[in-house]
Image: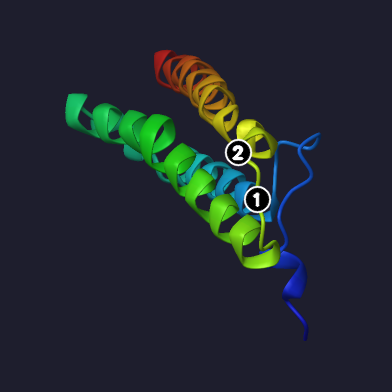
């Protein structure tokens, strides 16, 4: 099986590469795991803080690093202006992370209030 498509740089108009989709699937899997196992019932501040750090710092930086590696692996001459779209991944992941935390917190609160 050929996995060459996984190491292709993303089109600047797409914003999401294959690695970002993989990270997003990890977030969805984490949400399903927590929802099914009632792990959020005993979650405290440290758990919430670690999820926030992962969603708002680790995922965007990992996404940028993988994309930069793919771009420099494919092209010999890279103009910095062509890589501006990579910086837009940080606010995009912040928006995804904040929406995920707000929506999931409301769902968990509604689940345990009943």
Q: Quadrant of the N terminus?
A: bottom right
Secondary element at tag 1 = loop
Q: Give the quadrant of residue 93.
A: top right
Is 24 positioned to the left or the right of 58 in the image? right
- Within 10 Å of the Cα at label 1, are there few (<14), some (14-19), or many (20+) other Cα atoms? few
In the figure, residue 38 lies in which quadrant? top left
Closer-to-camera residue (52/85): 85
Using a 10 Å C-alpha cutoff, classify the residue at mark 2 as few (fewer than 14 neighbours), some (14 to 19) or many (20 or more): few
Tell me the distance, in whole angstroms, between the alpha carbons under discs 2 and 1: 6 Å
Q: Label 2 belongs to which residue? A: 80
Q: Position of residue 64 (x, y in %)?
A: 52, 44
What's the residue at 52%, 42% (across, down)?
Answer: 27
Q: Nearer the viewer, residue 60 or 75?
A: 75
- Tell me how the rendering is colored: rainbow
Residue labelled with disc 1: 78
Q: Which mark is residue 31?
A: none
- Give the residue displayed 49% in from the left and 14% down from the top: 106
Count of numbered badges drawn on the protein: 2
- The image shows residue 113 at horizontal and vertical percentages of 41, 13
Give left or right: position of 74 versus 23. right
Percent of width and height locating residue 103: 54, 18
Disc 2 and disc 1 in contact, CB within 8 angstroms: yes
On screen, residue 65 versus residue 19, left or right, reads: left
Report the residue at 24% width, 32% height from top.
Answer: 42
Who is closer to the viewer here, 95 or 8? Answer: 8
- Give above or below for 73 relative to 54: below
Q: Nearer the viewer, residue 37 or 73?
A: 73
Image-based side of 4 in relation to 111, left or right:
right
- Which residue is drawn at the image coordinates 74% and 49% (left, top)? 10
Secondary structure of the residue carrying numbered label 2? helix
């Amino acid at each position: 099986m050929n996995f060459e498509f996984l190491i292709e740089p993303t089109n600047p108009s797409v914003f999401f590469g294959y690695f970002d989709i993989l990270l997003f699937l990890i977030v969805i899997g984490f949400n399903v795991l927590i929802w099914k196992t009632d792990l959020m019932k005993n979650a405290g501040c440290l758990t919430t803080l670690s999820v926030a750090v992962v969603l708002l710092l680790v995922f965007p930086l990992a996404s940028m690093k993988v994309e930069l590696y793919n771009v420099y692996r494919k092209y010999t001459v890279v103009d910095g202006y062509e890589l501006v779209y990579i910086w837009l991944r940080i606010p995009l992941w912040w928006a995804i992370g904040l929406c995920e935390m707000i929506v999931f917190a409301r769902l968990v609160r509604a689940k345990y209030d009943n």
